[in-house]
Image: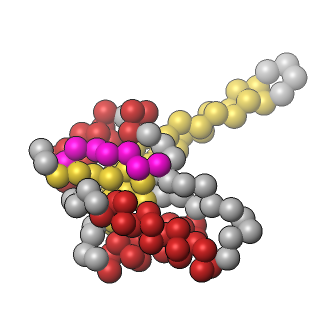
């Protein structure tokens, strides 16, 4: 495997389920490389976000990716997805099923959510 699947999120692939890792290997025949999604200041204007996106895209394209999973702050995600697609890069996001369980205790209700990976969907 010499191709790379870039995980451009704040969720390291070391925490992924076996199903998600298997999907990358089967669908993209790739090794996973984590590229952390950077923080985005709420005070940043559109030109600053576009500039940040350009830097991220250059870093990502340095891997010559087979595909990129891009999930993060909406403005930067939008810019990065569009820039990568303009370069012909396959850009995807992860789709999961959420199962929520509520448990009542004497003093409160505790709600927990479990997410199960289902598939990658292309932007």
- Which of the two residues, 46 or 113, is positioned nearer the viewer here? 46
- Which of the two residues, 26 or 118, is positioned nearer the viewer here? 26
Residue under the image location 43 percent in, 33 percent down: 15
Residue 94 appears in view: no
Residue under the image location 67 percent in, 76 percent down: 45
Q: Tell me: residue 9, above or below residue 18.
A: below
- Left/right placement of residue 44 relative to residue 116 reads right
Residue under the image location 35 percent in, 72 percent down: 84
- Residues shaded magenta: 29-36
Task: State how many labels appear.
Answer: 0
Q: Quadrant of the C terminus?
A: bottom left
Query: Looking at the picture, how far across and down is residue 106, in whole percent?
Result: 85, 19
Query: Looking at the picture, how far across and down is residue 11, in whole percent?
Result: 48, 43
Q: Tell me: residue 61, above or below residue 102.
A: below
Q: Quadrant of the N terminus?
A: top left
- Left/right placement of residue 98 relative to residue 22 reads right
Image quarter of residue 121: bottom left
Query: Looking at the picture, how far across and down is residue 103, in whole percent?
Result: 70, 27
Residue 112 appears in view: yes
Residue under the image location 39 percent in, 33 percent down: 14
Magenta stretch: dominant secondary structure? strand
In this view, the residue farthest toward the right is: 107
- Which of the two residues, 54 or 101, is positioned nearer the viewer here? 54
In this view, the residue farthest toward the left is: 1
Name the colouring of the figure: secondary structure
Magenta region includes residue 33? yes
């Amino acid at each position: 495997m010499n191709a790379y699947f870039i995980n451009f999120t704040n969720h390291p692939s070391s925490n992924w389920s076996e199903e998600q890792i298997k999907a990358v290997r089967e669908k993209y025949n790739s090794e996973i490389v984590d590229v952390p999604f950077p923080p985005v200041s709420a005070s940043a204007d559109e030109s600053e976000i576009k500039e940040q996106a350009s830097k991220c895209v250059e870093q990502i394209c340095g891997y010559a990716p087979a595909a990129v999973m891009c999930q993060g702050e909406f403005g930067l995600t939008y810019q990065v997805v569009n820039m990568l697609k303009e370069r012909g890069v396959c850009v995807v996001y992860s789709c999961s099923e959420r199962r929520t369980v509520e448990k009542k205790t004497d003093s409160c209700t505790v709600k927990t959510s479990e997410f199960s990976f289902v598939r990658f969907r292309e932007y």
